[in-house]
Image (tube, rainbow, N blue to C red):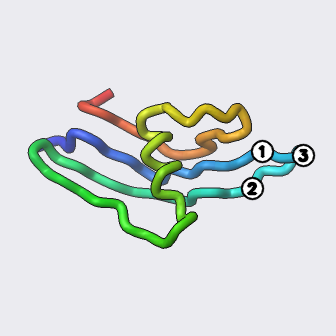
């Protein structure tokens, strides 16, 4: 069975003064239908930014997904 959500090597950077600052590095996740997963980590570890990036909802032009793939339902 193919996963409903598949994230491979997701890396997110912040562009500031011409430099790329890594915010999240190499996140890998598979979520199947009818499955629940929680993201756990310290404050500031990138949980919210990861979720917003999966949904393409982060609203800063300085934040970019610089590497990795996000596939939902095969797309």
Identified at 56% across, 59% down, the residue is: 25
Residue 40: x percent and y percent? 37, 67
Q: Earlier in the sequence, mark 2 or mark 1?
A: 1
The quarter of the image holding the N terminus is top left
- Residue at 49% x, 72% y is 42
Where residue 45 sits, quadrant-wise, is bottom right
> How far apart in space, not on screen, are marks 3 and 1 (Cα)?
7 Å
Q: Residues within 10 Å of mark 3 (few under 14, many from 20)?
A: few
Quarter occupied by the C terminus: top left
Q: Which residue is mark 3?
A: 17
Q: Label 2 vs label 1: CA separation?
A: 6 Å
Crowd band around label 1 with a 10 angstrom C-alpha radius: few (<14), some (14–19), many (20+): some
Q: Looking at the image, which residue is at 30% across and 33% down? A: 72
Q: Residue furthest bottom?
A: 42
Tell me the tag on residue 15.
1
- Secondary structure of residue under mark 2: strand
Dot 3: element = loop
Q: Residues within 10 Å of mark 2 (few under 14, many from 20)?
A: few
The residue identified by callout 2 is: 21
Q: Secondary structure at mark 1?
A: strand
**Residue 44 or residue 28, whichever sits in front:** 44
Give the quadrant of residue 6: top left
Q: Is residue 17 left or right of residue 60?
A: right
How far from the left and from the top, in percent, is residue 66?
Answer: 63, 43
Measuring from the top left, give residue 54's x and y in whole percent. 43, 39
Q: Tell me: 41 left or right of 2.
A: right
User: In the rendered structure, are the residues bearing label 3 and label 2 in contact, judged by CB atoms less than 8 Å apart?
Assistant: no
Q: CA distance from mark 3 to mark 2?
A: 10 Å
The answer to whether residue 41 is above or below residue 71 is: below
Name the one closer to the observer, 55 or 18. 55
Picture coordinates of residue 38, whole percent (x, y) = 28, 59
């Amino acid at each position: 069975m193919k996963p409903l959500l598949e994230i491979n090597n997701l890396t997110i950077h912040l562009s500031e003064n011409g430099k790329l600052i890594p915010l999240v590095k190499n996140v890998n996740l598979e979520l199947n239908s009818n499955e629940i997963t929680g993201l756990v980590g310290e404050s500031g570890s990138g949980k919210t930014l990861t979720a917003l990036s999966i949904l393409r909802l982060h609203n800063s032009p300085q934040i970019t997904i610089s590497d990795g793939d996000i596939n939902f339902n095969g797309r």
